[in-house]
Image: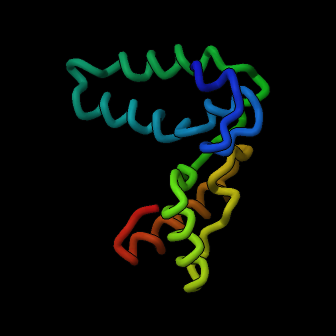
Amino acid sequence: EGSATKPSDLFLWKNPGEAYAYRRLAYRKMSEVLAAERPERLSTVPNEMLHQVMATEDVSTRHLVQVRTPPMSEAAKLALEALRANGEVIPTDLFTPQPYDETLLLLQQESSSSSSVHGAEL
């Protein structure tokens, strides 16, 4: 929640509140996996915690998702440039908060599949 109070150059958040977009879908999926893997202990707690945190989010950013972690170092940025130079399709807008859209998620999945062929998930 604290990260959501300010922009971040590292995570490419231009406005306060965009931090919620970061990993929104991943945290939702993790709560589902935990509940399925350990139902006796975790059938409700992870999902309740997720909802409690997300309930603190302003309505102005609830439609945003950030489907990929931005490159965290200069070396990571150069690696992405090299992959693109070799013909990899890695859209740059996957790294910034975007309105939730099934097309955006399909692009992310396609990009992940082609990147994993080269032995690394970016």
Hey, which quadrant is residue 77 in on the image? bottom right
What x and y, as percent, mark residue 112? 48, 65
Please identify the residue farthest to the front as the structure is shown.
Answer: 74
66 versus 77 height, above or below: above
Q: Is residue 62 visible?
A: no
Picture residue at 45% right of the left edge, 69% below the top? 113
Q: Is residue 71 above or below residue 99?
A: below
Residue at 61% of width from left, 44% of height from top? 10
Q: In this rendering, is residue 64 above or below 91? A: above
Q: Position of residue 116 (x, y in %)?
A: 40, 70
The image quadrant that residue 71 belongs to is: bottom right
Q: Which colour style is shown?
A: rainbow
Q: Nearer the viewer, residue 59 or 120?
A: 120
84 and 9: which one is in front? 9
Q: Residue furthest bottom?
A: 86
Report the residue at 46% width, 71% height from top.
115
Q: Quadrant of the N terminus?
A: top right
Numbered label tally: 0
75 relative position to 17: left or right: left
Asked if 12 appears above or below 58 in the picture, the reply is below
Q: Residue at x 53, y 77 (%)?
A: 83
Can I make out residue 52 in this image?
yes
Residue 108: horizontal and vertical position, in percent? 57, 60
